[in-house]
Image (cartoon, grey):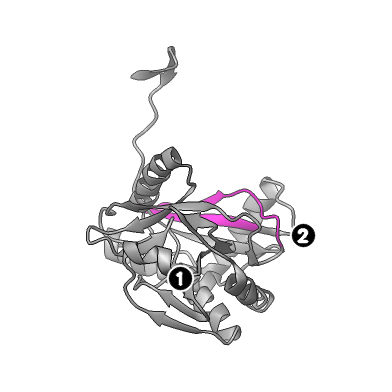
Amino acid sequence: MACLLRNGAPEKLPPAPTPFIYQTVHVRRGRPLLLPQHTALLGQYVRAFFGYDLRHNPQQIERQIAALLEANRQPASVSSFVRIEATADKELRLVPSAPSLYDGYALRSLRPEAAPLRYEIPFGDRPTSARLEALRWAKALVRNVGASTVIRCDRRDLVRAADDAPLFAVLGERIYTPPAPASIERDQALRAIDAARLGVTEQEIGREQLARFDELFYFDHRGITSLSGCGEALYTDIIAARIARTLPLISRG
């Protein structure tokens, strides 16, 4: 049997990873939010990439999520997160993440430093294991400049995302976001911005424009993360905090 050496000690060689499509679900007080929407989008991508139909329904997945969180003793008083992975081998896997400090979507207290990085994702900007692996490499690279969040730019230096989440840039009271594929997180962000009675414009944002904005934030399965800076630019979080006041509304799903 083949083996490898890890720090000089032999270990069994792990199997090659199987490509997968994923969705990360926010579970609030034991209830997965927007699960039918997540499974519908997952099914679309599985059909497009792997050519088969996803035969699990939301009710079945909800029961499996409940069993997974119970097995991992996740607290029910705050939010949890579960990544649903549909593989090229027609497996459906549920992978838990660390529980949240918050109950529902929230404005996270952590305000990370970001750095722009130019790189492309194999097979397009979709929720694939290739995107996750590319992000792992990107985050390792920006740690060299003291950042923990990657602002991904394409070969034309146009901004595409922050880590793997939709990015929003604020100038005054106007919010701008680059074009991006459909996602539950993007829809939730637009819903929260609308509830805060703010306008949002979809337009391309160049890497060199980032320093001109007052704020940068992204919206993922946890809620809003406001960035403290990018390069030499420093940002506030006034508009992000205003939008965050609407999050209890959308946390009800």
In the depicted view, which residue is nearer to us: 218 or 229?
229
Corner quadrant of residue 163: bottom left
In the picture, the disc for residue 169 is 1
Q: Where is mark 2, residue-wise?
A: 77
Task: Check the image and name the residue furthest to the right.
Answer: 77
Helix, strand or loop at mark 2: loop
In the depicted view, which residue is nearer to us: 56 or 148?
148
Label 1 vs 2, first from the N-terminus: 2
Locate the N terminus by quadrant: top left
User: Label 2 is placed on what type of residue?
Assistant: Ser
Check disc 1: other Cα within 10 Å, few if <14, some if 14-19, many if 20+: many
User: Label 1 is placed on what type of residue?
Assistant: Ala
Residue 139, above or below 179: above
Helix, strand or loop at mark 1: strand
- Residue 5 horizontal/vertical position (percent): 39, 16
Residue 77, above or below 14: below
Is 96 left, or right, of 176 in this rendering? right
- Residue 82 horizontal/vertical position (percent): 56, 55
55 in magenta: no
- Residue 159 horizontal/vertical position (percent): 34, 64
- Measuring 67% from the left and 66% from the top, which residue is drawn there? 104
- Residue 151 horizontal/vertical position (percent): 40, 57
Locate the C terminus by quadrant: bottom right
Q: Which residues are magenta?
A: 80-102
Observer able to see residue 46: no
Marks 1 & 2, CB-CB < 8 Å contact:
no
- Measuring 56% from the left and 62% from the top, which residue is drawn there? 226
**Cα–Cα gap, marks 1 and 2:** 32 Å
95 in magenta: yes
